[in-house]
Image (cartoon, rainbow, N blue to C red):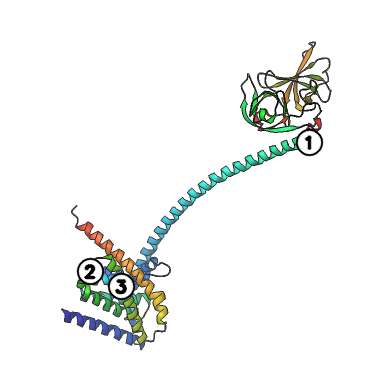
Amino acid sequence: MKIRALVLLGTVAAVCLLLLTLQMRGHIAGASDALAIVTTPVQSVLARVNKATVGLWSTYRDWKNVRAENRRLREETQQLRVDALRVTETIEENQRLRRLLALKESMPLATLSGEVIAREWGGWVRSLTVNRGRADRVTRLTAVIGPDGLIGRVVDVRPGASIVQVLTDPTSTVGAHAVRTRTQGIVEGEPRGTLRFKYMARDGSGIQVGDVVVTSGLGGLFPGGIPIGRVRTIDDRGSALFSYAQVTPAVDFARIDEVLLLTGGAARDVAASFRTDG
Amino acid sequence: MRAFLAIAVLGGGVAHATVGSALRIADVAPDIPLIVVVLLALRRGPEFGCGAGFVAGLLQDAATGGLLGVQALTKAVIGFGIGALGGRLRVSQPLVQVPGLVVLSLLEGLARFGLLQLFHFPAPFGELMVYVVLPQALYNGFLGAALVLALAWAETARSRPS
Protein backbone atom coordinates (compact mmCIF):
# COMPACT_ATOMS: atom_id res chain seq x y z
CA MET A 1 0.00 0.00 0.00
CA LYS A 2 2.67 2.49 0.99
CA ILE A 3 4.94 1.43 -1.83
CA ARG A 4 2.08 1.77 -4.30
CA ALA A 5 1.37 5.26 -3.07
CA LEU A 6 5.01 6.26 -3.29
CA VAL A 7 5.22 4.82 -6.79
CA LEU A 8 2.15 6.84 -7.74
CA LEU A 9 3.67 10.00 -6.31
CA GLY A 10 6.92 9.34 -8.11
CA THR A 11 5.11 8.73 -11.37
CA VAL A 12 3.07 11.88 -11.02
CA ALA A 13 6.16 13.90 -10.21
CA ALA A 14 8.01 12.43 -13.13
CA VAL A 15 5.13 13.13 -15.50
CA CYS A 16 4.87 16.68 -14.31
CA LEU A 17 8.57 17.35 -14.59
CA LEU A 18 8.60 15.76 -17.99
CA LEU A 19 5.69 17.91 -19.05
CA LEU A 20 7.44 21.01 -17.81
CA THR A 21 10.69 20.15 -19.45
CA LEU A 22 9.08 19.34 -22.75
CA GLN A 23 7.10 22.56 -22.62
CA MET A 24 10.17 24.61 -21.91
CA ARG A 25 11.82 23.05 -24.93
CA GLY A 26 8.75 23.68 -27.02
CA HIS A 27 7.98 20.07 -27.81
CA ILE A 28 4.39 19.62 -26.62
CA ALA A 29 2.57 22.71 -27.66
CA GLY A 30 -0.38 20.53 -28.58
CA ALA A 31 -0.81 19.22 -25.01
CA SER A 32 -2.42 22.42 -23.84
CA ASP A 33 -4.73 22.36 -26.83
CA ALA A 34 -5.74 18.79 -26.06
CA LEU A 35 -6.56 19.67 -22.48
CA ALA A 36 -8.37 22.77 -23.62
CA ILE A 37 -10.74 20.58 -25.63
CA VAL A 38 -11.86 19.13 -22.29
CA THR A 39 -11.65 22.20 -20.16
CA THR A 40 -13.09 24.87 -22.43
CA PRO A 41 -16.65 23.47 -22.66
CA VAL A 42 -16.72 22.88 -18.92
CA GLN A 43 -15.45 26.39 -18.36
CA SER A 44 -18.10 27.79 -20.68
CA VAL A 45 -20.86 26.02 -18.79
CA LEU A 46 -19.45 27.09 -15.45
CA ALA A 47 -19.03 30.64 -16.70
CA ARG A 48 -22.65 30.66 -17.82
CA VAL A 49 -23.83 29.29 -14.48
CA ASN A 50 -21.61 31.73 -12.69
CA LYS A 51 -22.91 34.62 -14.79
CA ALA A 52 -26.51 33.60 -14.19
CA THR A 53 -25.92 33.24 -10.46
CA VAL A 54 -24.06 36.52 -10.23
CA GLY A 55 -26.78 38.14 -12.35
CA LEU A 56 -29.48 36.80 -10.06
CA TRP A 57 -27.57 37.96 -7.04
CA SER A 58 -26.98 41.38 -8.59
CA THR A 59 -30.68 41.66 -9.43
CA TYR A 60 -31.59 40.74 -5.86
CA ARG A 61 -29.10 43.23 -4.48
CA ASP A 62 -30.30 45.94 -6.87
CA TRP A 63 -33.88 45.23 -5.87
CA LYS A 64 -32.93 45.38 -2.23
CA ASN A 65 -31.01 48.62 -2.77
CA VAL A 66 -33.86 50.12 -4.75
CA ARG A 67 -36.27 49.20 -1.97
CA ALA A 68 -34.02 50.71 0.66
CA GLU A 69 -33.45 53.77 -1.50
CA ASN A 70 -37.16 54.06 -2.13
CA ARG A 71 -37.84 54.00 1.60
CA ARG A 72 -35.09 56.51 2.23
CA LEU A 73 -36.40 58.80 -0.52
CA ARG A 74 -39.93 58.56 0.82
CA GLU A 75 -38.71 59.58 4.25
CA GLU A 76 -36.65 62.35 2.69
CA THR A 77 -39.66 63.56 0.70
CA GLN A 78 -41.79 63.59 3.84
CA GLN A 79 -39.11 65.54 5.66
CA LEU A 80 -38.76 67.96 2.75
CA ARG A 81 -42.50 68.50 2.68
CA VAL A 82 -42.49 69.28 6.37
CA ASP A 83 -39.49 71.56 5.86
CA ALA A 84 -41.19 73.28 2.92
CA LEU A 85 -44.31 73.85 4.99
CA ARG A 86 -42.20 75.18 7.80
CA VAL A 87 -40.36 77.50 5.43
CA THR A 88 -43.61 78.72 3.88
CA GLU A 89 -45.04 79.27 7.33
CA THR A 90 -41.93 81.14 8.38
CA ILE A 91 -41.95 83.27 5.24
CA GLU A 92 -45.59 84.16 5.79
CA GLU A 93 -44.99 84.93 9.44
CA ASN A 94 -41.99 87.00 8.45
CA GLN A 95 -44.07 88.99 5.98
CA ARG A 96 -46.81 89.53 8.55
CA LEU A 97 -44.35 90.64 11.18
CA ARG A 98 -42.59 92.94 8.73
CA ARG A 99 -45.88 94.61 7.90
CA LEU A 100 -46.73 94.87 11.58
CA LEU A 101 -43.32 96.31 12.32
CA ALA A 102 -43.65 98.81 9.49
CA LEU A 103 -47.02 99.85 10.90
CA LYS A 104 -45.64 100.07 14.42
CA GLU A 105 -42.80 102.29 13.25
CA SER A 106 -45.05 104.53 11.22
CA MET A 107 -47.59 104.99 13.99
CA PRO A 108 -47.38 108.35 15.78
CA LEU A 109 -48.70 106.64 18.93
CA ALA A 110 -47.19 104.28 21.45
CA THR A 111 -48.05 100.70 20.54
CA LEU A 112 -47.60 97.25 21.96
CA SER A 113 -47.42 94.18 19.77
CA GLY A 114 -49.29 91.08 20.78
CA GLU A 115 -49.90 87.58 19.58
CA VAL A 116 -53.31 86.02 19.21
CA ILE A 117 -53.47 82.97 21.47
CA ALA A 118 -57.17 82.13 21.21
CA ARG A 119 -60.28 82.94 19.18
CA GLU A 120 -63.97 82.88 20.01
CA TRP A 121 -65.87 82.64 16.77
CA GLY A 122 -69.43 81.73 17.80
CA GLY A 123 -72.28 83.93 16.63
CA TRP A 124 -72.90 85.36 20.06
CA VAL A 125 -69.46 86.60 20.74
CA ARG A 126 -66.58 87.28 18.34
CA SER A 127 -63.34 87.88 20.15
CA LEU A 128 -59.64 87.26 20.18
CA THR A 129 -57.40 86.61 23.15
CA VAL A 130 -54.07 88.42 22.94
CA ASN A 131 -51.02 87.54 25.05
CA ARG A 132 -50.76 91.01 26.54
CA GLY A 133 -52.47 91.84 29.79
CA ARG A 134 -52.38 93.76 32.97
CA ALA A 135 -48.67 93.10 33.40
CA ASP A 136 -48.09 94.97 30.13
CA ARG A 137 -50.22 97.89 31.31
CA VAL A 138 -52.93 97.21 28.82
CA THR A 139 -56.14 98.97 29.76
CA ARG A 140 -59.74 98.32 28.89
CA LEU A 141 -61.01 99.84 25.60
CA THR A 142 -57.53 99.99 24.11
CA ALA A 143 -57.82 100.00 20.32
CA VAL A 144 -56.40 97.00 18.56
CA ILE A 145 -55.21 97.23 14.97
CA GLY A 146 -53.45 95.18 12.33
CA PRO A 147 -51.51 96.17 9.20
CA ASP A 148 -54.76 96.26 7.20
CA GLY A 149 -56.87 98.23 9.62
CA LEU A 150 -59.00 98.17 12.75
CA ILE A 151 -59.55 94.87 14.52
CA GLY A 152 -61.46 95.90 17.61
CA ARG A 153 -61.04 96.97 21.19
CA VAL A 154 -59.93 95.41 24.46
CA VAL A 155 -62.98 94.58 26.53
CA ASP A 156 -61.37 92.58 29.30
CA VAL A 157 -57.87 92.74 30.73
CA ARG A 158 -56.41 89.77 32.60
CA PRO A 159 -53.01 89.33 34.24
CA GLY A 160 -51.35 87.84 31.17
CA ALA A 161 -53.88 88.32 28.40
CA SER A 162 -56.55 90.59 27.02
CA ILE A 163 -59.85 89.84 25.33
CA VAL A 164 -60.37 91.84 22.17
CA GLN A 165 -63.87 92.40 20.91
CA VAL A 166 -63.71 92.08 17.14
CA LEU A 167 -65.54 94.58 14.92
CA THR A 168 -67.90 91.86 13.69
CA ASP A 169 -69.09 91.08 17.22
CA PRO A 170 -72.86 91.80 17.29
CA THR A 171 -72.41 94.25 20.15
CA SER A 172 -69.56 96.18 18.57
CA THR A 173 -70.06 99.74 17.39
CA VAL A 174 -67.45 102.14 16.08
CA GLY A 175 -67.76 105.75 15.00
CA ALA A 176 -66.78 105.99 11.33
CA HIS A 177 -66.95 108.03 8.18
CA ALA A 178 -66.68 107.39 4.46
CA VAL A 179 -63.41 108.88 3.29
CA ARG A 180 -64.64 110.23 -0.05
CA THR A 181 -67.87 111.87 1.10
CA ARG A 182 -66.97 112.44 4.77
CA THR A 183 -70.39 110.98 5.66
CA GLN A 184 -70.46 110.24 9.37
CA GLY A 185 -72.02 107.10 10.75
CA ILE A 186 -71.57 104.00 12.90
CA VAL A 187 -70.11 100.68 11.89
CA GLU A 188 -71.93 97.83 13.64
CA GLY A 189 -71.21 94.15 13.86
CA GLU A 190 -73.87 91.70 12.81
CA PRO A 191 -74.64 88.22 14.18
CA ARG A 192 -73.75 86.60 10.86
CA GLY A 193 -70.24 88.00 11.11
CA THR A 194 -70.59 90.93 8.73
CA LEU A 195 -70.35 94.70 9.15
CA ARG A 196 -72.76 97.41 8.27
CA PHE A 197 -72.33 101.16 8.11
CA LYS A 198 -75.32 103.04 9.48
CA TYR A 199 -75.59 106.66 8.46
CA MET A 200 -78.12 109.47 8.18
CA ALA A 201 -79.90 109.11 4.85
CA ARG A 202 -79.79 112.76 4.01
CA ASP A 203 -76.00 112.89 4.50
CA GLY A 204 -75.16 109.75 2.64
CA SER A 205 -76.76 110.11 -0.75
CA GLY A 206 -73.35 110.27 -2.36
CA ILE A 207 -71.95 107.01 -0.92
CA GLN A 208 -70.98 104.49 -3.57
CA VAL A 209 -69.94 100.90 -3.63
CA GLY A 210 -66.18 100.67 -3.05
CA ASP A 211 -65.95 103.68 -0.78
CA VAL A 212 -63.50 103.28 2.06
CA VAL A 213 -64.83 103.59 5.58
CA VAL A 214 -62.41 104.60 8.35
CA THR A 215 -62.64 105.42 12.03
CA SER A 216 -63.83 108.96 12.62
CA GLY A 217 -61.85 109.56 15.79
CA LEU A 218 -64.93 111.03 17.42
CA GLY A 219 -65.62 109.83 20.93
CA GLY A 220 -61.93 109.53 21.78
CA LEU A 221 -61.91 105.74 21.79
CA PHE A 222 -60.20 105.08 18.46
CA PRO A 223 -57.78 107.35 16.64
CA GLY A 224 -59.20 108.67 13.41
CA GLY A 225 -58.25 107.33 9.98
CA ILE A 226 -57.94 103.61 10.74
CA PRO A 227 -59.42 101.61 7.84
CA ILE A 228 -62.50 99.57 8.71
CA GLY A 229 -63.55 98.34 5.29
CA ARG A 230 -65.11 99.07 1.91
CA VAL A 231 -68.73 99.56 1.01
CA ARG A 232 -69.96 96.39 -0.68
CA THR A 233 -73.69 97.11 -1.12
CA ILE A 234 -75.95 100.01 -0.26
CA ASP A 235 -79.30 99.37 1.32
CA ASP A 236 -81.27 102.51 0.43
CA ARG A 237 -84.42 102.58 2.56
CA GLY A 238 -86.10 105.47 0.75
CA SER A 239 -87.58 107.96 3.20
CA ALA A 240 -86.24 106.26 6.33
CA LEU A 241 -84.08 108.28 8.65
CA PHE A 242 -81.05 105.97 8.37
CA SER A 243 -79.54 104.19 5.45
CA TYR A 244 -77.27 101.15 5.68
CA ALA A 245 -74.31 99.98 3.67
CA GLN A 246 -72.78 96.50 3.90
CA VAL A 247 -69.08 96.82 4.50
CA THR A 248 -66.41 94.29 3.64
CA PRO A 249 -63.90 94.39 6.54
CA ALA A 250 -60.40 95.57 5.72
CA VAL A 251 -59.06 92.91 8.07
CA ASP A 252 -59.51 89.18 7.62
CA PHE A 253 -60.34 88.46 11.25
CA ALA A 254 -60.04 84.71 10.85
CA ARG A 255 -56.40 84.98 9.84
CA ILE A 256 -55.00 87.42 12.34
CA ASP A 257 -52.03 86.13 14.28
CA GLU A 258 -50.32 89.30 15.43
CA VAL A 259 -51.84 92.62 16.48
CA LEU A 260 -50.85 96.05 17.70
CA LEU A 261 -52.44 97.51 20.81
CA LEU A 262 -52.60 101.31 20.77
CA THR A 263 -51.49 102.04 24.30
CA GLY A 264 -50.62 105.66 23.64
CA GLY A 265 -54.17 107.00 23.58
CA ALA A 266 -56.38 107.89 20.64
CA ALA A 267 -55.99 111.58 20.26
CA ARG A 268 -54.35 111.64 16.84
CA ASP A 269 -55.34 110.83 13.32
CA VAL A 270 -53.33 107.88 12.04
CA ALA A 271 -54.64 107.68 8.48
CA ALA A 272 -51.14 108.28 7.10
CA SER A 273 -49.97 104.98 8.55
CA PHE A 274 -52.36 102.98 6.37
CA ARG A 275 -52.57 102.50 2.64
CA THR A 276 -56.20 102.53 1.62
CA ASP A 277 -56.18 103.53 -2.08
CA GLY A 278 -59.47 105.17 -1.50
CA MET B 1 -19.84 8.44 -5.01
CA ARG B 2 -17.20 8.08 -7.69
CA ALA B 3 -19.13 10.46 -9.91
CA PHE B 4 -19.26 12.97 -7.08
CA LEU B 5 -15.52 12.64 -6.54
CA ALA B 6 -14.87 13.06 -10.25
CA ILE B 7 -17.08 16.14 -10.40
CA ALA B 8 -15.42 17.55 -7.30
CA VAL B 9 -11.93 17.08 -8.70
CA LEU B 10 -12.66 18.09 -12.28
CA GLY B 11 -15.11 20.84 -11.35
CA GLY B 12 -12.80 22.15 -8.67
CA GLY B 13 -9.95 22.28 -11.13
CA VAL B 14 -11.84 24.18 -13.77
CA ALA B 15 -14.10 26.24 -11.53
CA HIS B 16 -11.18 28.13 -10.09
CA ALA B 17 -10.81 30.23 -13.21
CA THR B 18 -14.51 31.03 -13.49
CA VAL B 19 -16.39 30.73 -10.20
CA GLY B 20 -13.32 31.60 -8.17
CA SER B 21 -13.37 35.15 -9.48
CA ALA B 22 -16.85 35.61 -8.05
CA LEU B 23 -15.46 34.87 -4.60
CA ARG B 24 -12.72 37.45 -4.96
CA ILE B 25 -12.27 39.80 -2.02
CA ALA B 26 -9.98 42.80 -2.54
CA ASP B 27 -8.37 41.11 -5.54
CA VAL B 28 -7.65 37.93 -3.59
CA ALA B 29 -9.29 34.75 -4.88
CA PRO B 30 -9.25 31.45 -3.00
CA ASP B 31 -7.51 28.37 -4.44
CA ILE B 32 -10.62 26.21 -4.66
CA PRO B 33 -8.88 23.17 -6.19
CA LEU B 34 -6.38 23.11 -3.33
CA ILE B 35 -9.19 23.13 -0.76
CA VAL B 36 -11.01 20.37 -2.64
CA VAL B 37 -7.84 18.27 -2.89
CA VAL B 38 -7.08 18.68 0.82
CA LEU B 39 -10.61 17.74 1.85
CA LEU B 40 -10.64 14.70 -0.43
CA ALA B 41 -7.16 13.58 0.60
CA LEU B 42 -8.13 13.73 4.27
CA ARG B 43 -11.04 11.37 3.63
CA ARG B 44 -9.64 9.12 0.95
CA GLY B 45 -5.95 8.74 1.73
CA PRO B 46 -2.63 9.55 0.02
CA GLU B 47 -3.19 7.78 -3.29
CA PHE B 48 -6.47 9.46 -3.96
CA GLY B 49 -5.09 12.76 -2.71
CA CYS B 50 -2.14 12.46 -5.05
CA GLY B 51 -4.32 11.57 -8.06
CA ALA B 52 -6.89 14.22 -7.30
CA GLY B 53 -4.17 16.82 -6.82
CA PHE B 54 -2.57 15.87 -10.10
CA VAL B 55 -5.84 16.03 -12.08
CA ALA B 56 -7.13 19.17 -10.41
CA GLY B 57 -3.76 20.89 -10.72
CA LEU B 58 -3.38 19.88 -14.34
CA LEU B 59 -6.84 21.22 -15.17
CA GLN B 60 -6.06 24.38 -13.27
CA ASP B 61 -2.83 24.77 -15.23
CA ALA B 62 -4.69 24.28 -18.47
CA ALA B 63 -7.58 26.52 -17.50
CA THR B 64 -5.40 29.38 -16.33
CA GLY B 65 -2.95 29.16 -19.21
CA GLY B 66 0.11 28.47 -17.06
CA LEU B 67 2.82 25.92 -17.50
CA LEU B 68 1.24 22.48 -17.56
CA GLY B 69 2.44 20.42 -14.66
CA VAL B 70 3.37 23.05 -12.09
CA GLN B 71 0.22 23.01 -10.04
CA ALA B 72 -0.36 19.40 -10.99
CA LEU B 73 2.85 18.50 -9.21
CA THR B 74 2.46 20.79 -6.19
CA LYS B 75 -1.13 19.77 -5.59
CA ALA B 76 -0.30 16.12 -6.09
CA VAL B 77 2.42 16.40 -3.45
CA ILE B 78 0.09 18.29 -1.08
CA GLY B 79 -2.67 15.74 -1.66
CA PHE B 80 -0.30 12.89 -1.02
CA GLY B 81 1.15 14.46 2.10
CA ILE B 82 -2.20 15.33 3.63
CA GLY B 83 -3.59 11.94 2.73
CA ALA B 84 -0.67 10.27 4.46
CA LEU B 85 -0.83 12.48 7.55
CA GLY B 86 -4.61 12.66 7.71
CA GLY B 87 -5.00 9.91 10.27
CA ARG B 88 -2.70 11.67 12.72
CA LEU B 89 -4.31 15.11 12.39
CA ARG B 90 -7.33 16.23 14.41
CA VAL B 91 -8.87 18.11 11.58
CA SER B 92 -12.42 18.30 12.93
CA GLN B 93 -11.51 21.41 14.95
CA PRO B 94 -11.82 24.77 13.16
CA LEU B 95 -8.79 25.91 15.17
CA VAL B 96 -6.80 23.26 13.30
CA GLN B 97 -8.53 23.65 9.95
CA VAL B 98 -7.88 27.34 9.46
CA PRO B 99 -4.16 27.42 10.31
CA GLY B 100 -3.73 24.00 8.68
CA LEU B 101 -5.07 25.22 5.36
CA VAL B 102 -3.10 28.44 5.66
CA VAL B 103 0.12 26.48 6.20
CA LEU B 104 -0.69 24.11 3.35
CA SER B 105 -1.41 26.98 1.02
CA LEU B 106 1.87 28.62 1.99
CA LEU B 107 3.68 25.35 1.38
CA GLU B 108 1.99 24.97 -1.97
CA GLY B 109 3.00 28.51 -2.84
CA LEU B 110 6.57 27.89 -1.81
CA ALA B 111 6.68 24.66 -3.75
CA ARG B 112 5.25 26.31 -6.83
CA PHE B 113 7.74 29.15 -6.58
CA GLY B 114 10.62 26.68 -6.10
CA LEU B 115 9.51 24.67 -9.08
CA LEU B 116 9.10 27.70 -11.26
CA GLN B 117 12.55 28.91 -10.26
CA LEU B 118 13.89 25.90 -12.10
CA PHE B 119 12.34 27.42 -15.19
CA HIS B 120 13.58 30.93 -14.46
CA PHE B 121 10.34 32.42 -13.16
CA PRO B 122 11.07 36.16 -12.88
CA ALA B 123 8.78 37.36 -10.01
CA PRO B 124 10.57 38.37 -6.76
CA PHE B 125 9.96 35.97 -3.86
CA GLY B 126 9.08 38.56 -1.20
CA GLU B 127 6.47 40.37 -3.23
CA LEU B 128 4.93 37.12 -4.39
CA MET B 129 4.63 35.89 -0.83
CA VAL B 130 3.26 39.12 0.65
CA TYR B 131 0.81 40.07 -2.09
CA VAL B 132 -0.23 36.72 -3.55
CA VAL B 133 0.55 33.65 -1.50
CA LEU B 134 -0.12 34.90 2.03
CA PRO B 135 -3.48 36.62 1.36
CA GLN B 136 -4.63 33.62 -0.64
CA ALA B 137 -3.49 31.27 2.12
CA LEU B 138 -5.51 33.18 4.71
CA TYR B 139 -8.55 33.19 2.46
CA ASN B 140 -8.15 29.45 1.83
CA GLY B 141 -7.98 28.83 5.57
CA PHE B 142 -11.26 30.51 6.34
CA LEU B 143 -13.09 29.30 3.25
CA GLY B 144 -11.89 25.74 3.80
CA ALA B 145 -12.96 25.78 7.44
CA ALA B 146 -16.38 27.07 6.43
CA LEU B 147 -16.63 24.33 3.85
CA VAL B 148 -15.67 21.67 6.42
CA LEU B 149 -18.29 22.96 8.83
CA ALA B 150 -20.91 23.02 6.07
CA LEU B 151 -20.09 19.46 5.06
CA ALA B 152 -20.21 18.29 8.68
CA TRP B 153 -23.57 19.97 9.13
CA ALA B 154 -24.88 18.40 5.91
CA GLU B 155 -23.71 14.96 6.99
CA THR B 156 -25.32 15.34 10.40
CA ALA B 157 -28.56 16.44 8.79
CA ARG B 158 -28.47 13.51 6.37
CA SER B 159 -27.77 10.90 9.05
CA ARG B 160 -30.51 12.19 11.35
CA PRO B 161 -33.59 9.93 11.22
CA SER B 162 -36.49 11.75 9.60
What's the distance in space between the residues labelled 2 and 3, CA to CA?
A: 19 Å
Tell me the quarter of the image containing the N terminus of chain B: bottom left
Of residues A110 and A74, the one drawn nearer to the viewer in this rendering? A110
- What is the three-letter code of the residue carrying label 3? Leu
At x 79%, y 20%, the residue is: A219
Place of residue A250 in the rendered image (x, y in percent of width and height, measured from the top left)? 73, 28
**Chain for mark 2?**
B
Query: For the residues tagged 2 and 3, is the chain the same?
Result: yes
What's the distance in space between the residues labelled 1 and 3, CA to CA?
A: 91 Å
Place of residue B18 in the rendered image (x, y in percent of width and height, measured from the top left)? 37, 69
For label 2, count other residues whose C-alpha is less than 10 Å away and answer few (under 14), some (14-19) or many (20+). Answer: few
> Circle 3 sits on which residue?
B34
Q: Is residue B79 left or right of residue A72?
A: left
Query: For the residues tagged 1 and 3, is the chain the same?
Result: no
Can residue A36 be seen?
no
Of labels 1 and 2, the one closer to you: 1
Q: Earlier in the sequence, mark 2 or mark 3?
A: 3
- What is the three-letter code of the residue carrying label 1? Ser
The label on residue B90 is 2
The label on residue A106 is 1
Point out the residue furthest to the bottom here. Answer: A25
Of residues A231 and A268, the one drawn nearer to the viewer in this rendering? A268
